[in-house]
Image (cartoon, rainbow, N blue to C red):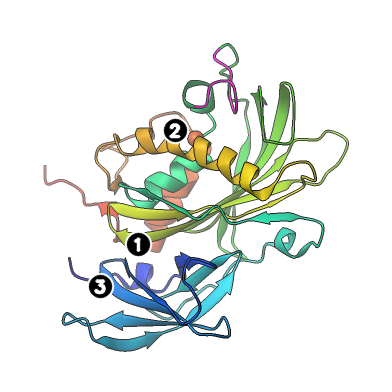
Amino acid sequence: MTATTDPVARNEWVACGWLGQIAPGGSHDTMIMGQPIRVRRDDNDGYRVTELEADGVEGRELPVQTRFTCIFTTLGTPTRPLPEIAEFDEPDRKVVGCGNVAVSTSPYRLVENFLDMAHFSFIHVDTLGATDKTEVLAYRTEHRKDVDEIWALDCTFYQPAASKAVEGGQMTRYKYRVMSPFSVMLYKNINAETDRTDAICVFIQPVTQTHCLAYMPMAMVDDKNSAAAIAEFQQSIFLQDRVILENQRPALLPLDPTYELPTRADASSIAFRRWLKAMDIRFGIQEKQAA
Ligand SMILES: [Fe+2]
């Protein structure tokens, strides 16, 4: 495996660990986009990230930022900053990190799965979906050019148990936000009496083109459940998705519409693919087959 040369992918911030993963004074070796790296934590909670040469010697130092319970780095020169997610700064929120989950697929399949409401009734039966209420109601998507993000708005879906904090079924209101090719989040309103929404993110560490680690930090409105219980609920949902994701072929994402139409007539998936194509990202993309 060699590091990607794709400048578009290299210039994005990507997650490479979570706060608490490494003991003070310790280090963790991992990989982003085929490039081996070492993440070091000093005794004052400072982090350093370096590339690892073929002989295991530390080489070039990479930029590093810590936010949303995660450690971020980049192989290039980022053209976009880390996103602003104000919910993580609200003092009464329960911020839960959830660690990471390994998934053998491309980063964009992970994003598309996260955006897709149509699978709730089939994959997350009795929690996020019900087998007798499968309809995805119309919603709208937009490309917010000022921040170069894809949003899906006015999403609603019937959910038997929308989160750890609710009992009984309800129509849940969603907003989705694709913040970069490797990060996506949703705002989920599970309480009709307030406009406050849970903020649930997926930051993807693209280890290789077809192997990812997914970090799922959340900033929740929930004074009933422990962080551990919230994390356990989220992980159980995500493990159901992993089975589906790892069986999708090809693992790389085709952007040529004649190769694969998005499996469901899914507006957010179409907007996401159009956006990836326009930015000319190559890493993790299925090249067009010769006729
Ligand atoms: Fe899912």
In the image: residue 129, left or right of residue 226: left
Front one among 276 and 249: 249
Question: Is label 2's Cβ within 8 Å of ligand 1?
Answer: yes
Say above or below: 216 vs 268: below
Residue most extreme to the right: 193
Q: CA distance from mark 1 to mark 2?
A: 31 Å
Identify the residue position indicated by label 1 in the image.
280
Name the amino acid, label 1: Asp
**Helix, strand or loop: magenta stretch:** loop
Q: Quadrant of residue 91?
A: bottom right
Which mark is on residue 5? 3
Q: Quadrant of residue 173?
A: top right
Question: Is label 1's Cβ within 8 Å of ligand 1?
Answer: no
Q: Is residue 152 visible?
A: no
User: In percent of the image, x 38 and y 45: which residue is there?
Assistant: 109
Identify the residue position indicated by label 2 in the image.
240
Name the amino acid, label 3: Thr
> How busy is the neighbourhood of tag 3: few (under 14 within 10 Å), some, or many (20 plus)?
some
> How busy is the neighbourhood of tag 2: few (under 14 within 10 Å), some, or many (20 plus)?
few
Question: Where residue 142 sits: x, y (%)?
Answer: 60, 49
Q: Quadrant of the C terminus?
A: top left
User: In percent of the image, x 74 and y 36: which residue is there?
Assistant: 165
Earlier along the polypeptide chain: callout 1 or callout 2? Answer: 2
User: In percent of the image, x 31 and y 81: which residue is there?
Assistant: 51
In the image: residue 32, left or right of residue 240: left
The stretch of residues the image draws in magenta is 124-131
Is 129 included in the stretch rendered in magenta?
Answer: yes
Secondary structure under tag 1 reads loop
Name the amino acid, label 2: Gln
Secondary structure under tag 2 reads helix
Q: Quadrant of the N terminus?
A: bottom left
Say above or below: 254 vs 126: below
